[in-house]
Image (cartoon, grey):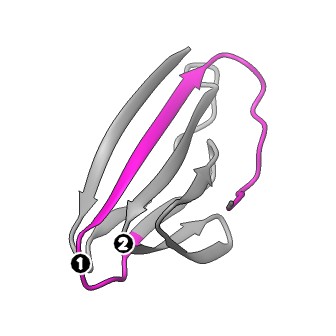
Amino acid sequence: MHISLVLNKIQPGGGIEEHYHKYDADMPIFDHICYVISGRVRANVGDVERIVGAKRLIYCPSNIRHSITNIGDSLAKLIIVSGSGEGAKEGVPIYF
């Protein structure tokens, strides 16, 4: 299993374009958990859209389209933890 930890700083109006991580034998799992440190973002995960503020998590499972857009007036900061490895894909979009 491989894990990455990234700090993303997103300018107002900017974001992470819609994408997904293909679920296949080479990369059976590549999920993200995004922790919003500050700011206000619009998170789209599959068919679910939510406005998410500080101290909240966004879960982006493998093979599900997702995007994040800073809809606030200031810099949004997110810590993104990504994991990949072997095993059965589980999960659906979940917001805490």
Percent of width and height locating residue 46 = 65, 64
Callout 1: few (<14), some (14-19), or many (20+) C-alpha neighbours within 10 Å? Answer: some
Percent of width and height locating residue 85 = 59, 18
Q: Quadrant of the C terminus?
A: bottom right
81, above or below 38, in the image: above
Residue 65's quadrant in the figure?
bottom right
What label does residue 18 carry, if any?
Answer: none
Q: Three-letter amino acid code at disc 2?
A: Gly
Q: Three-letter amino acid code at disc 1?
A: Ser
Q: Can residue 12 be seen in this view?
A: yes
Magenta region: 69-95
- State yes or no: residue 86 in magenta: yes
Q: In screen coordinates, is 46 left or right of 44?
A: right
Residue appearing at x 23%, y 78% in the figure:
74
Residue labelled with disc 2: 39
Callout 2: few (<14), some (14-19), or many (20+) C-alpha neighbours within 10 Å? Answer: many
Q: In screen coordinates, is 61 left or right of 76?
A: right
Percent of width and height locating residue 20 = 52, 50
What label does residue 74 carry, if any?
Answer: 1
Q: In screen coordinates, is 41 left or right of 25?
A: left
Label 2: which secondary element: loop
Label 1: which secondary element: loop
Percent of width and height locating residue 47 = 68, 72
